[in-house]
Image: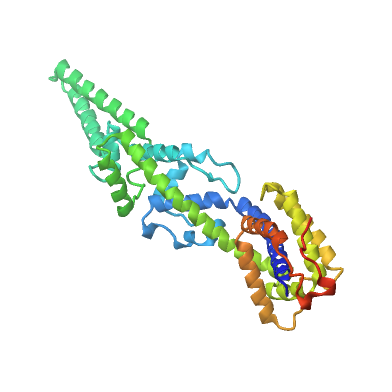
Amino acid sequence: MTGLTVLDVFISLVFIYLLYSLFAMTVIEFITSSFGSRSKNLQTGIDRLLADDNQSSKWNHTFLNLFYSFSTNAFTQFFYKHPSIKYLGHKGINTKPSYISANRFSSTLVDILKKGYHEESTDNISASLGQILPFDLSELEARIDQLKADLKDLKSKPSSSSFEIEATQEELDFLKNDLQKRLQRFGESFHEDLNIGPDTKYQLSSLWNKSENDIEKFQSLINHWFEEQMDRISGWYKRKVTFLTFLVGFIIAALFNVDTIHLVKDLSQNETMRTLLVDSAQEFIANNPDGITENMTSEQRDYISSVKKEMDQYTSVLSNNKEDNFPAILGWLISAFAFSLGAPFWFDLLNKLMKVRPSIQIPANNPEKKGSEDVITKAIG
């Protein structure tokens, strides 16, 4: 084969990979949108911040997390139940938000930690992190009960002075008002239910100590901590989607019999098919000068249909030879791996190859290439 023939085979193969990568991308986008995969991946990332290893599931770090979030950590659940997070999502099956800003994460976390029966928010944060004891309401309630009994006893004794009764009543009213304020400010006991793991508590305590009990500085440190985690969360999502794309790509390759091994063989022997695919590739590049766009994912199915219809008129590039299943499966695996590289990768490569193609020349003085191959340059357009 001449250098141009080899290049045309490669261009044809890359173009086929591009079309089916776009098709796989459409399927993946439908799957991830339907299952709210981004929100589930984000929940896994936040759970990684708020849960110790023994409180989180290893399944969350597999591609299964794209379909379901295995989160049972109480601290994470409290975070997602907080109004500032809860109402970011929408009603329905996928209620969790797919994006949370660093400021919202830190302000929500601080708001959860500072809830308590202490009067000062800083004391409540310290209590949540186990640095001081939480305020014990039972002591306050016991003192109120004792004062009620004392007041009743004083009123029943004729010898009791009005000063004693008034002083006891004032103290009782003050403590009852104090109890009511603490209950209104706090609502329910988070300290007993948060169940912050020792490793997570150590990390948050380190940030709290570094802030020197300054809530604004503490929130800023949490911002930075969250932003660092977000970089890893994005990487997790890409790896999960890449693996899912490989699985979807294998199914597509099997359904459409996109066998790379047979494709290379057929393309190297069928000039008509090479010409058809190279021309189609040239047209595709010309129609999409800006690269991969959202419109491509819907339009590319028309390309697949039209190209395949043309190929069916000849000896079919997508070979239906099933004499040996092992080579076919191997070819499907190669195709699936190619699809998992993504349509942008194949588009960029195809664009570069089409620019190189016009510069490939066939030597005019080659004695073996006389007659029908007496062409100096074979180029599209």
Q: Which residue is drawn at 45% across and 53% down?
A: 232
The answer to whether residue 105 is above or below residue 166 is: below
Q: Which residue is drawn at 48% across and 40% down?
A: 85
Q: Image quadrant for the C terminus?
A: bottom right
Horizontal side of residue 50 vs 39, given as left or right: left
Tell me which colouring the rendered structure shows: rainbow
Q: Image quadrant of residue 123? A: top left
Residue farthest to the right, as pictured: 313
Horizontal side of residue 212 vs 325, given as left or right: left
Query: Is residue 143 among the parts visible in the rendering?
Result: yes
Residue farthest to the left, as pictured: 159
Q: Position of residue 186 (x, y in %)?
A: 36, 34
Horizontal side of residue 53 vs 4, given as left or right: left
Q: Where is residue 94 in the image (x, y as percent from the top left)?
A: 58, 48
Q: Foreground: 27 or 88? A: 27
Q: Foreground: 67 or 312? A: 312
The answer to whether residue 50 is above or below residue 356 is: above
Residue farthest to the front, as pictured: 365
Q: Foreground: 115 or 96? A: 96
Residue farthest to the bottom, as pictured: 323
Q: Foreground: 244 or 69? A: 244
Q: Image quadrant of residue 323? A: bottom right
The answer to whether residue 263 is above or below residue 38 is: below
Q: Image quadrant for the N terminus?
A: bottom right
Horizontal side of residue 132 vs 45, given as left or right: left
Q: Where is residue 61 in the image (x, y as percent from the top left)?
A: 47, 60
Q: How many marks?
A: 0
Query: Is residue 320 among the parts visible in the rendering?
Result: no
Q: Residue at x 78, y 71 (%)?
A: 317
Q: Image quadrant of residue 137? A: top left
Q: Where is residue 164 in the image (x, y as percent from the top left)?
A: 15, 20
